[in-house]
Amino acid sequence: IQKDEDFRPNFHFTPKNNWMNDPNGMFYFNGYFHLFFQYYPDDNVWGPMHWGHAISSDMISWKEQPIAIYPDEKGYIFSGSAVVDKNNTSGFGKDGKTPIVAMFTYHDPKGEEKGAIDYQSQAIAYSLDEGQTWTKYEANPVIENPGIKDFRDPKVTWDGIHQQWIMVLAAQDKTLFYTSKDLKNWTRQSEFGEGIGAHGGVWECPDFFPMYVEGTDEVKWVLIQSLNPGGYNGGSGTQYFIGDFDGKKFTPVEQMSNLDSNHPYWIDFGKDNYAGVTWANIPEENGRTLFLGWMSNWEYAQKVPTETWRSAMTVARELKLEKMDGKYLISSVPVKELQSYRSKKYKDQNVQIDGLTKIIDAEKIALSSAEIRFEISDLQKTTYQFKLSNLVGDELLFGYDHSNNEFFINRSKVGQTDFSKEFASEISTAPRISTANNLDGTIIIDRTSIELFFDEGKTVMTEIFFPNRPWETLSVQSMDVPFTLNEIEAYQLTFN
Ligand code: FRU
């Protein structure tokens, strides 16, 4: 029976010890990607929040660093962001050193206990040693609570188009937009969200940035907005909106102007990708929009069957803004850096599938650390179902039901599931966005997670699992007709 360290991912970031939730303060500087995270170093459940820290040169192999920011008498250090203040607009720079400025939410537990509503405010801190140590600004908070109970998770971005700092903040059922010249003085400009999009829970952890529409020089603005609960398959989830921004106000494109809660605009439809945001200061010439989320769900995150560590991050992803049949959408794929860990390769073509057929086993590729690509052309009105299984009968089912244009993941027999009734009681589904007559997919498997990127990432699903033994076999079948698996390509991913 697997437990604890057996469940620790091979290549998804986990803290060595204890509890982690949201990614925070992500920035790139001097060759390193920085990842901070909501961290409670003293227990394996949520508690007084710190910012943990990790660095990586490629967003795949991470090195945990000492805790970056500690809670203090003003409160716990909740989620937030960090920017590289190259022009020293904040004045925090010294001796030619570039200040990194972090903005986070102070959550005052004493206020919360007393039943106040104004116990969350926004504060800043700066680092002159590339994020290792931080000095909190003496005049914190920089944004006082205006009387809103859930008022948190500031995400700052340099808006080169309007030459200003912009910041989005989650405020209960809305996103608030602020601007600043110096990262200290903030002006509230506008808000977005009333009566639009999914509202099954509190809005948290927004992000806001411009993107080019793929293959054009058209620019649109993307608002990422997590919420909990109210996600596409229940619990926490991350929706997005696309629109225009005049430097003060965000206006969604027409296709999104009347979105109800049942909309198809989700960064990830699986249950385990939450509070994800993008890296700041990615070099312009490269221009990528790089994203990573917390690979769990508040429904059961504190109960999953690991002891010494709890929660991992998703694999880092590159987001793309596409226009398909006149409609905008965000797609995402694993960052290309993951490909440099490919070792052993297995490839086959035109595989005839008639009934349940084994396509990969541990001899070909170990399924605890694998990247698998497949393609099926001439889709028929049937369900294509993949199955990961092991020697003790655990199984993870996933695939595509072409009659309903729906992808799915079924964890009901995945091994250890009884720690939470929300974990596996329902099959997760996702709408197919692409209308192509062939289906391709990339499957990223680690010891306790699967990330599915269908149709070049137009529909993405991420879920975690805790099998009693490692997966041995990947097989596939269609529910009623034979078909041809046109291509299957699998790589062992190897990490030292
Ligand atoms: C999202 C969240 C944030 C908050 C943080 C606290 O998962 O609830 O809104 O800042 O976690 O740890």
Image (cartoon, helix red, strand yellow):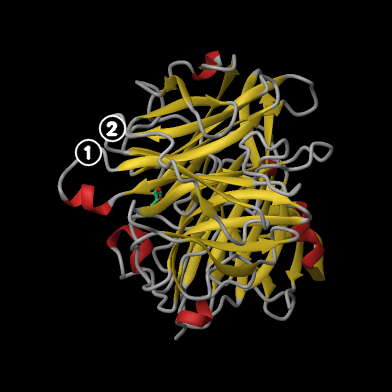
The single residue placed furthest to the right in the displayed view is 285
Going by the numbered disc 2, the residue's amino acid type is: Ile
Residue labelled with disc 2: 148
Q: Residue at x 51, y 81 (%)?
A: 5
Which residue is at the far left?
A: 114
Mark drawn on residue 117? 1
Query: Label for residue 81?
Result: none
Q: Mark 2 touching mark 1, by CB under 8 A?
A: yes
Quadrant holding the N terminus: bottom left
Q: Position of residue 495 (x, y in %)?
A: 73, 74
Can the viewer see residue 488?
Answer: no
Residue 260 image position (x, y, % from top left): 39, 24
Q: Secondary structure at mark 1?
A: loop
The answer, for residue 149, to whether it is visible in the render is yes
Indicate if the residue with disc 1 has its beta carbon within 8 Å of ligand 1: no
Q: Is residue 242 above or below residue 102?
A: above
Using the image as rendered, state which of residue 468 and residue 229 is in the foreground. Answer: 229
For disc 2, the neighbor class at 10 Å (few under 14, some 14 to 19, many from 20) is some
Q: Secondary structure at mark 2?
A: loop
Residue 484, x across and y down, in percent = 72, 53
Residue lying at the far front of the rendered structure? 95
Residue 211 location, quadrant: top right
Residue found 77% across the figure and 37% down from its top? 287
Q: Earlier in the sequence, mark 2 or mark 1?
A: 1
Quarter-of-image position of residue 140: top left
Ligand 1 under 8 Å from disc 2 Cβ: no
Is residue 304 shown left or right of residue 479?
Answer: left
Q: What amino acid is found at the position of numbered circle 1 in the picture?
A: Ile
Looking at the image, residue 150 lies above or below residue 34? above
Q: Tell me the distance, in whole angstroms, between the alpha carbons under discs 2 and 1.
A: 6 Å
